[in-house]
Amino acid sequence: NRNVGIIGTGSFLPAKTITNKDLETLVDTTDEWIRSRTGIEERRMVEESVAASDLGVEAAKKALEDANISAEEIDLIIVATLTPDYTFPSTACIVQEKLGAKKAAAFDLSAACSGFIYGLATGAQFIATGLYKYVLVIGSETISKILNWEDRGTCVLFGDGAGACVLGPVEDGKGFQSFVLGSDGSGAELLSQPSSGSKLPITSETIANKENTLKMVGSEVFKFAVRVMGQVSEEAVEKAGLNKEDIDFFVPHQANIRIIEPAMKRLGLGMDKAYINLHKYGNMSSASIPVALDEALQSGSIKKGDNVLLVGFGAGLTWGATVVKM
Ligand code: ACO
């Protein structure tokens, strides 16, 4: 098997910013409540005409430039998203055309906020086996379009954005050291978009009832998230044959600062070892981890040779983690 690693990253955020103060005018909430309960201060939001593929393409262009390869060299495009352009065709096919990735296969992957980790694990297998050389993994979300802007329990938490990584062969000792993926469908209804597919097709009635928007049992998802983030982090470190002390940097899913802090404690890492951008962008689901990873690399928080732990959790329920040596 070939060693596989991340050879380029990129991210893209829409310009429009929605602050907590802005939300005070929409729902019964306060800047103080949102900050103290989540850590979120503002988030980005796309214009009406912008789709997940548009954000994804911009992030992908930067990742290709960073990897110094052309779109024509990409063998496979995986787009992780819970807000695809369409149910079908896949957002990955729209991205394939927009990038001019002529020889690429393309598909979408549905694992909500764990989607990017699932995408890395999936893409890496094609390269490890020698079937493909370069795989583009994108996490792109326009969550603002599926929110219920009358539900203060959810509309304050999420934001729009996209991040991308190019995966490719890397030298011995580098790249992905472990993957841990998991699911528990018994929690499917804790976080979902009830009227969005074949189970409860979108009708004027489901729209009137707001069943076509994101629904969440926040307190249950919170308990699950705190438990799973620490647990899966430990598993990924152990599977990589490493100790907690060997982890140089942590890039967690950015849902809530109160979910990340206990995980850092359990890992015995100081908060300065975690990249946090949820105060600027909120929870961008599949885009949170790749945007944070790109920013951490650009800012020099992550250096060449660092062991980086990436951990996600989300709807499904799903979870995933990887240790990657940069
Ligand atoms: N402003 C003011 N009050 C609010 C707001 C708000 N924006 N939202 C909820 N409240 C109220 C509730 O109505 C409740 O009031 P009540 O006691 O009168 O009923 C009170 O605050 C406490 O609500 P809780 O849900 O217990 O508050 P908690 O401290 O748990 O924080 C939160 C809520 C932030 C949603 C938290 O539960 C959380 O972060 N959950 C995890 C969410 C998450 O990570 N989801 C994404 C998973 S990833 C994916 O796949 C998309």
Image (cartoon, helix red, strand yellow):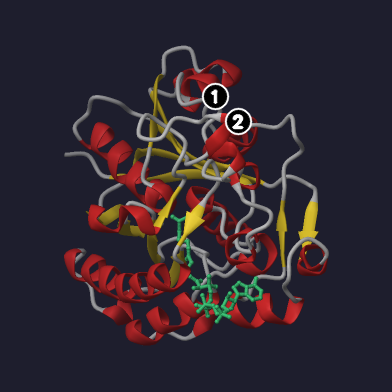
Mark 1, ligand 1, within 8 Å: the answer is: no
Q: Which residue is mark 1?
A: 95
> Percent position (x, y) of residue 128?
22, 37
Instruction: Provide residue 294's location: percent of width, then percent of height.
Output: 56, 53
Q: Is residue 313 above or below residue 222?
A: above
Q: Name the amino acid, label 1.
A: Val
Q: What is the three-letter code of the residue carrying label 2?
A: Val
* Mark seen at residue 57: 2
Residue beneath the point at 34% across and 82% down: 267
Asked if the residue under mark 1 is in contact with the one under mark 2, i.e. CB atoms within 8 Å, the reply is yes
- Looking at marks 2 and 1 on the same chain, the residue that comes earlier in the sequence is marked by 2
Q: Residue at x 54, y 20 (%)?
A: 94
Q: Which mark is residue 3?
A: none
**SS at mark 2?**
helix
Residue at the image position 44 percent from the left and 71 percent from the top? 249
In front: 189, or 11?
189
Q: Quadrant of the C terminus?
A: bottom left
Q: Quadrant of the N terminus?
A: top left
Tell me if I can see residue 264 in this picture: yes
Looking at the image, in which quadrant does ligand 1 appear? Answer: bottom right
232, 135: nearer the viewer:
232
- Residue 179 location (% of width, % of height): 25, 55
Query: For numbered disc 1, what is the local secondary structure?
Result: helix
